Image: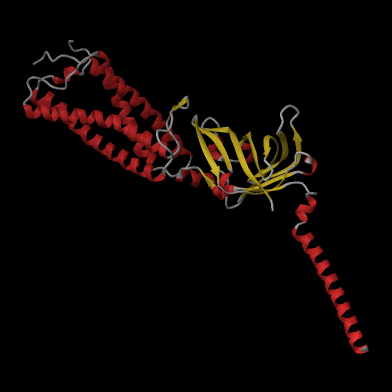
């Protein structure tokens, strides 16, 4: 009987230890796996739905608009209109995903003269401040750093953020100067032939992160 | 045979204006097509496209003028066979001059770089971007260019034949300073 009690006590002890270990491991795993969520402090984190999203740049080539789309991007988008100070919009775009719709154009855009994809494979935007527009509902101003081809520029972009609960749209338009990022070297610095102004339009379809 | 009636003044002006422009256009096209991908190719092909649009405009004006003046390519002195040959060559020349810029416009549209006019205006794309269609129109454009060169050779040889061998002064139709 004593033996049985002792055994029982040992069993209880080992069961308690197991539960304790499991709880600690779960906590650590939770922290490691969902730390982003914890950092986001309960605010909405989003995935980009690439099939419904578009990132397009348009430049005027000898007066004719020439558009290029980027078919891939990844990002960390934590965005909540009630918690803008903890909101983040970080987007990474692989340069090789560009499509000009013209074989020669693709080759040229990836070459050293333009994106120099071999040396600088990504373009990156990192936000540091998101503010509400004072006049328009659902309109925001996103300030951050844009890094292309080893050049960093601070930009401030107006965006429209429509949150439908489980999905949302984040869209906007901005004008950049391509020569700020050395996009076009040598004869391509001629802005009469290739406009310095580049219109960037984006519409990101977002799904709430599960 | 010295009283061959002149074509209207505008027709003659357009003919002789288009001669140097077409020569320039052919040289530009052949040369730019061989350039490697880069600024020079883009620059000269843009100019080629602009000049092509100018030539298309001049051609349409020329055709319109020809139509309202009911101008004929033919002379009464020509044999039926000659008449047929003259009609075929002239109509083919016009067809080439019309289809060369149109196929170029289609090719440029498929390549997503529709023509402009020396940076001043841009013309709309005629079709959606499509790389395989671009290649097809490119081949058609090139075929037309060679056909046009062949027809031009016949046209010039025929002019010399009329002037030096038949001596029917048919060249007076297109000359300046001859009697109307």
Q: Nearer the viewer, residue A49 or B135?
A: A49
Q: Residue at x 77, y 56 (%)?
A: A35
Quarter of the image where one finds residue B180:
top left
| Residue B40 shows in this picture | yes
Q: Quadrant of the N terminus of chain B?
A: top left
- Residue A45 placement, left or right of A18: left
Q: Which percent across, then down, holds residue B136? A: 34, 43
Q: Nearer the viewer, residue B5 or A4?
A: A4
Q: Residue at x 77, y 46 (%)?
A: A43
| Residue A116 shows in this picture | no
Quarter of the image where one finds residue B70:
top left
Query: Is residue A109 positioned above or below B121 on the image?
Result: below
Q: Nearer the viewer, residue B67 or A44?
A: A44
Q: Which percent across, then down, holds residue B66? A: 23, 18
Q: Which percent across, then down, holds residue B93? A: 23, 30
Q: Residue at x 30, y 22 (%)?
A: B60
Q: Residue furthest front?
A: A1
Quarter of the image where one finds residue A89:
top right
- Residue A56 placement, left or right of A159: left
- Residue A183 placement, left or right of A107: right
Q: Which percent across, then down, holds residue A28? A: 80, 64
Q: Residue furthest top?
A: B180
Q: Residue furthest right?
A: A2
Q: How many marks?
A: 0
Query: Is residue B111 positioned above or below B118 on the image?
Result: below
- Residue B179 placement, left or right of B96: left
């Amino acid at each position: 009987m004593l033996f049985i009690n002792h055994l029982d006590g040992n069993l209880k002890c080992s069961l308690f230890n197991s539960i304790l270990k499991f709880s600690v491991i779960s906590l650590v795993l939770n922290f490691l796996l969902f730390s982003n969520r914890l950092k986001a402090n309960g605010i909405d984190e989003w995935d980009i739905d690439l099939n419904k999203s578009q990132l397009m740049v348009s430049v005027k080539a000898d007066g004719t608009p020439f558009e290029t789309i980027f078919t891939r991007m990844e990002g960390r988008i934590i965005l909540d209109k009630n918690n803008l100070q903890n909101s983040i919009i970080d987007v990474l775009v692989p340069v090789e995903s560009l499509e000009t719709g013209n074989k020669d154009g693709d080759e040229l855009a990836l070459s050293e003269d333009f994106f120099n994809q071999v040396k600088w494979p990504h373009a990156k935007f990192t936000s540091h401040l998101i503010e509400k527009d004072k006049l328009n509902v659902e309109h925001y101003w996103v300030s951050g750093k844009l890094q292309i081809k080893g050049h960093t520029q601070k930009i401030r972009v107006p965006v429209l953020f429509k949150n439908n609960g489980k999905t949302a749209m984040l869209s906007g338009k901005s004008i950049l100067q391509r020569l700020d990022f050395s996009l076009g070297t040598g004869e391509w610095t001629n802005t009469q032939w290739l406009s310095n102004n580049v219109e960037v339009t984006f519409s990101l379809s977002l799904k709430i992160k599960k | 045979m010295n009283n061959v009636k002149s074509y209207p003044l505008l027709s003659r002006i357009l003919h002789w204006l288009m001669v140097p422009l077409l020569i320039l256009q052919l040289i530009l096209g052949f040369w730019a097509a061989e350039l490697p991908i880069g600024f020079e190719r883009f620059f000269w092909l843009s100019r080629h496209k602009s000049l092509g649009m100018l030539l298309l405009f001049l051609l349409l004006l020329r055709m319109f003028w020809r139509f309202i003046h009911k101008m004929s390519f033919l002379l009464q002195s020509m044999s039926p066979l000659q008449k047929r040959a003259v009609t075929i060559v002239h109509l083919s020349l016009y067809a080439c001059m019309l289809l060369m810029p149109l196929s170029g416009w289609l090719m440029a549209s498929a390549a997503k770089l529709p023509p402009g006019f020396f940076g001043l205006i841009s013309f709309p794309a005629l079709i959606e971007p499509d790389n395989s269609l671009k290649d097809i129109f490119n081949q058609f454009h090139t075929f037309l260019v060679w056909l046009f060169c062949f027809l031009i050779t016949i046209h010039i040889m025929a002019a010399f034949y009329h002037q030096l061998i038949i001596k029917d002064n048919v060249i007076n139709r297109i000359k300046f300073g001859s009697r109307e």
